[in-house]
Image (cartoon, rainbow, N blue to C red):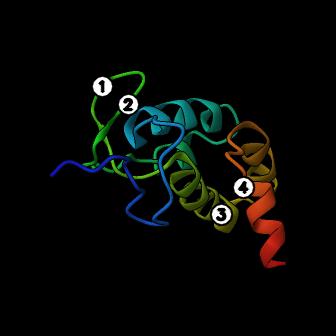
Amino acid sequence: MRAMFNRCMECDEIVTNPICSECLAEQMRTAVAEDSPKLAKLIQGINTMGETLCLFCHKRVGLCAHCFSKDVHELIAEKNPQLAKKFMAQFDFELRTKIADFE
């Protein structure tokens, strides 16, 4: 039986912004490379399987944009906190709201 809605494999929420991590990673690498080409090379997508298809490349999406952005934000914050703030402004996907809940 096919799932009626695709849920994120990390947070179990319904994927409402179906962009695969490979497409997001490409956009993120481009943005981060402006300030840190070395750090940009660390950003890699994850091949996940889900029922929803990516809006751009039509691959299956199993990880929501929020969770992938959160993981990349944590990676950047460890290496360059100032760049992490800039990243959050570009790839928010509700990161500010969720991070504020934990502070």
Residue drawn at x 66%, y 68% is 78
Q: Residue furthest top?
A: 56
Residue that carries the numbered disc 4 in the rendered image = 95
Residue drawn at x 43%, y 32% is 23
Three-letter code for the amino acid on which mark 4 is drawn: Leu
- Asked if disc 2 and disc 1 are in contact, CB closer than 8 Å, the reply is yes
Quadrant in which the C terminus appears: bottom right
Residue that carries the numbered disc 3 in the rendered image = 79
Residue drawn at x 44%, y 66% is 10
Three-letter code for the amino acid on which mark 2 is drawn: Cys
Dot 3 or dot 1: first in sequence order is 1
Expressed as whole percent of the image width and height from the top left, the position of residue 60 reads: 27, 38
Tell me the crowding category of disc 3: few under 14, some 14 to 19, or many 20 or more residues within 10 angstroms, Cα based.
few
Residue drawn at x 37%, y 49% is 6
Relative to 7, 72 lies left or right: right
Residue that carries the numbered disc 1 in the rendered image = 58
Dot 2 or dot 4: first in sequence order is 2
Relative to 81, 91 lies left or right: left
Q: Residue furthest bottom?
A: 103
Tell me the crowding category of disc 2: few under 14, some 14 to 19, or many 20 or more residues within 10 angstroms, Cα based.
some
Three-letter code for the amino acid on which mark 3 is drawn: Lys
